[in-house]
Image: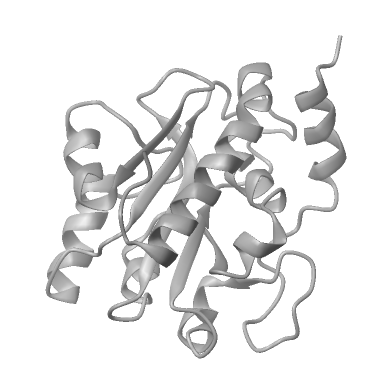
Amino acid sequence: MVSGAQRLVQEQWAPCRIGVQRASAPPHGLGCSHVGDVAGAWALKQLCLLVCGERLRRDDGAAILAVGLLPADVRELAEIIEVGQLSVEALLDVEEGAGVVVADAAVGVAPGEVVTLPLADLAAAARRGGPAPASSHSIAPDQVLALAAELRGGELPGLFVGLGGADFGLGEGLSAPVADALPRFTSAIAAAIRSQAHTGKTPT
């Protein structure tokens, strides 16, 4: 039997196509930009949501789907940018002084578990086998963050919001525990955006 959350995922998958709009284009769909368009986006927003994942690798596409479910008022608070995977380039493109939220499927946590932690704590968590972005393939997350911090001259303040995945194989659709947790993942991303936009503190 298909649960309500799984049905919602099936309905959202086809139209969810973030990363197709340029930052200079009028708002359309999710109003997202490619990573190369980050610099031009800051004229309008001072908070960046970096969306990681690959929609054709099952649970790896969870963040893409979750962002498609964000309320309009939350999307207005941030420039939403699909980056594929957490990379040094994506972090360097975030303007000095701007807030950032990174959303991705996660490893190191149980499937369906939602985690939120400061980017400053993400490297240490990844090194000890804790929560880490599932979409960082070529370079380990702690190395990505360390190199970006060195090149930027300091750590990038912000939050990581992750959803533990179960299946990262080729194909569309989410595993049952990830599909069921998608509404909670979306709510956590929204809380992180609101927190960074208004207080700069980690949501509780």
The residue under the point 30% across, 54% down is: 201
Q: Is residue 153 above or below residue 199?
A: below
The percent coordinates of residue 189 (x first, y second) are 52, 47
The residue under the point 54% across, 22% down is: 112
Q: Can residue 137 be spotted in the picture?
A: no
Tally of numbered discs: 0
For the N terminus, the quadrant is top right
Q: Can residue 177 be spotted in the picture?
A: yes
The percent coordinates of residue 182 (x first, y second) are 64, 33
The residue under the point 17% across, 63% down is: 155
Q: Is residue 59 above or below residue 42?
A: above
Q: Residue furthest top?
A: 1
Q: Quadrant of residue 156?
A: bottom left
Instruction: Say whether residue 47 is left or right of residue 92.
Output: right
The residue under the point 78% across, 34% down is: 9
The percent coordinates of residue 105 (x first, y second) are 50, 37
For the C terminus, the quadrant is top left
